[in-house]
């Protein structure tokens, strides 16, 4: 009960303080009339924050079959790419192309088309059967295959869903 009374007193005093904050006494009015205006200091080197980067719409929101993520990694762990990147050593041995697709209303087949220096190195057909589906393909990388690589993800009708580029050094 004491705490409740104390809280009510604090609220009442706060309300009175806020209510009277705008009331000026004769002394305040006199001070306001006789006080010289103080110069406003210029703000130097004020940097404006850049506007936030536009966010990409989530493909899952469209309701259409779409590629949500595509990554290259040297391993897949717990159905996710492990240590994904864009540059890998020539000694990597094997790389995985991980894809996360959304809104497959019925079973579909996609294709991972692997390219080395624009030459086709192989195609892997993969089943997609769910509203959100993760899958991957793998490619053995020869130590002599240094240079640019890419994987194109093709939809059921051969349409390009996405591309990921990477390099072997």
Image: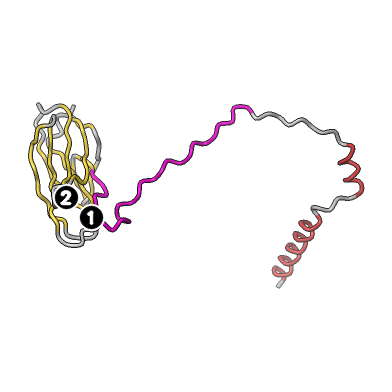
* Res 121 quadrant in image: top left
How packed is label 2: few (under 14 Cα within 10 Å), some, or many (20 or more)?
Answer: some
Q: Is residue 158 left or right of residue 84?
A: left
Residue where numbered disc 1 is placed:
65
Q: Which residues are magenta?
A: 44-70
Please identify the dominant SS of the magenta region.
loop
Percent across and percent down for residue 61 are 32, 56
Instruction: Pick the residue in front: 33 or 71.
Output: 33
- Residue placed at 9% from the left, 32% from the top? 119
Residue 155 is labelled as 2
SS at mark 2 in the image: loop
- Residue placed at 30% from the left, 55% from the top? 60
Percent across and percent down for residue 103 are 24, 58
Percent across and percent down for residue 138 are 12, 43
Q: CA distance from mark 2 to mark 1?
A: 9 Å
Q: Is residue 128 magenta?
A: no
Instruction: Pick the residue in front: 43 or 54.
Output: 54
In this picture, is 76 found above or below 45?
A: below
* Res 97 quadrant in image: top left
Instruction: Pick the residue in front: 88 or 52.
Output: 52
How packed is label 1: few (under 14 Cα within 10 Å), some, or many (20 or more)?
Answer: many
Does the residue at mark 2 contact the one at mark 1 (Cβ under 8 Å)?
Answer: yes
In this picture, is 90 found above or below 139?
A: above
**Which mark is first along the chain, 1 or 2?**
1
Q: Is residue 142 left or right of residue 100?
A: left
Q: Is residue 55 left or right of residue 23?
A: left
């Amino acid at each position: 009960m004491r705490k409740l009374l104390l809280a009510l007193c604090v609220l009442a005093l706060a309300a009175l303080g806020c209510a009277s904050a705008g009331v000026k006494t004769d002394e305040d009015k006199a001070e306001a009339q006789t006080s010289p205006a103080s110069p406003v200091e210029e703000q130097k080197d004020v940097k404006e924050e850049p506007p936030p980067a536009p966010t990409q719409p989530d493909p899952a929101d469209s309701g259409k079959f779409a590629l949500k993520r595509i990554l290259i990694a040297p391993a897949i762990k717990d159905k996710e790419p492990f240590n994904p990147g864009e540059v890998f050593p020539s000694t990597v041995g094997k790389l995985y192309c991980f894809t996360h697709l959304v809104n497959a209303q019925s079973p579909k087949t996609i294709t991972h088309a692997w390219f080395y220096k624009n030459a086709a190195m192989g195609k892997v057909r993969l089943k997609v059967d769910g509203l959100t589906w993760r899958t991957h393909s793998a490619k053995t990388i020869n130590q002599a295959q240094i240079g640019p690589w890419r994987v194109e993800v093709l939809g059921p009708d051969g349409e390009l869903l996405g591309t990921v580029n990477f390099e072997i050094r």
